[in-house]
Amino acid sequence: MAIDTTPVDPNAPLQKKPISWLNLGIGAGLNIFEVSTLGQPFEVIKTHMAANRGDTMPGAVKRTWARGGVFGFYQGLIPWAWIEAATKGAVLMFAASELEYHFRVLGASPAAAGILGGMGGGIAQAYTTMGFCTFMKTVEVTRHKDAGAAAKPTVQVAREIFAREGIAGINKGVHAVAVRQCTNWGSRFGISRIVEDVFRKFAQTEADRESKKPLSSLQKIVASAVGGALSCWNQPIEVIRVEMQSQVKTVGRPEKMTIASAAKWIYSQNGFKGFYRGVTPRVGLGVWQTVCMVFGGDSVKAYFANKK
């Protein structure tokens, strides 16, 4: 999902942003491309390190390769990551746009409305599609698979969890996902806006600023990449989320975890540094998502605009 870097005039008449079905389709297609290329390998390594906090990044890569070679880095891709990729952008765009408009009606500034809309859109993602998709992706990365044995199909695993634990079981850790997405998008929008303002102040002329000249594609990528990378400050909630959804069996580990009990368990086992396991591949994931969704999104939209 690309961050809209179009400058907003606070004095302009308030209008609700239209939802373009073409843009939703482009967003879904680019999300699927992103996760099917480098996105899922980054996700798998990040999840492995968050669940197995004693492993280094080279160790996580080695163990992932041992689980299935190249295909080991794409565990959870089909259907869960594809379902998530095809829907989360549309949910975010719709929810964030609606919330941003209503916050503006209530008197919020464009920047504040954008941040609050992004936070609300992130929460909407979690409770619609991302909750169960993220859970099942984590299950695929962390569940035990005997070498040489036929592993259960992922859909069968989902059915067994649903039959045993119902909706709550298939959405285990969804509240942590909601907190992560809320802080993710609030940070991404907020930090990206700050970087954009720096570019306008130091890289544009006074005439450019007065005419509200848009930033270049490179400047948009850099601003969003910085926002995506620095938003990883919330890695502790991501590690907590993975721990709540993990299938790794450890002696003494609580069976049913809340956010608080998961945090207590992680700290007791790994100390403060345990909350930042997997942050490096997560930064890499954020940068790759930015390249795909900002640069790729602008390029594809421009292509279709020129076809009209």
Image (cartoon, helix red, strand yellow):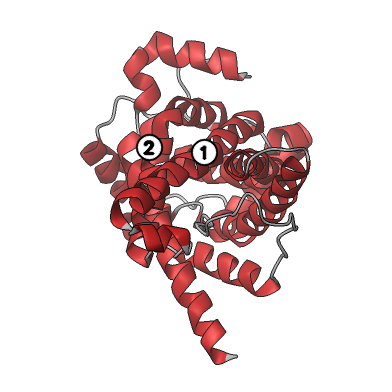
Q: Residue at x 45, y 49 (%)?
A: 149
Identify the element where label 1 is drawn. Answer: helix
Identify the element where label 2 is drawn. Answer: helix
Which amino acid type is marked by label 2?
Leu
Considering every residue shown, the one lying at the far bottom of the view is 307
Whole-percent x, y for residue 300 in the image: 49, 76
Residue holding disc 2:
230
Considering every residue shown, the one lying at the far left of the view is 58
Residue holding disc 1:
184
Q: Residue at x 69, y 70 (%)?
A: 20
Whole-percent x, y for residue 291 in the image: 38, 61
Which amino acid type is marked by label 1?
Asn
Query: Neighbour class for label 2 at 10 Å: few (<14), some, many (≥20)?
Result: some
Residue 251 seen from this side: no
Q: Compare residues 144 and 128 and report the one nearer the observer.
A: 128
Q: Is residue 129 left or right of residue 146?
A: right
**How far apart in space, not on screen, are marks 2 and 1 (Cα)?**
10 Å
Residue 177's place in the image compared with 288, above or below, is above
Quadrant that contains the C terminus:
bottom right
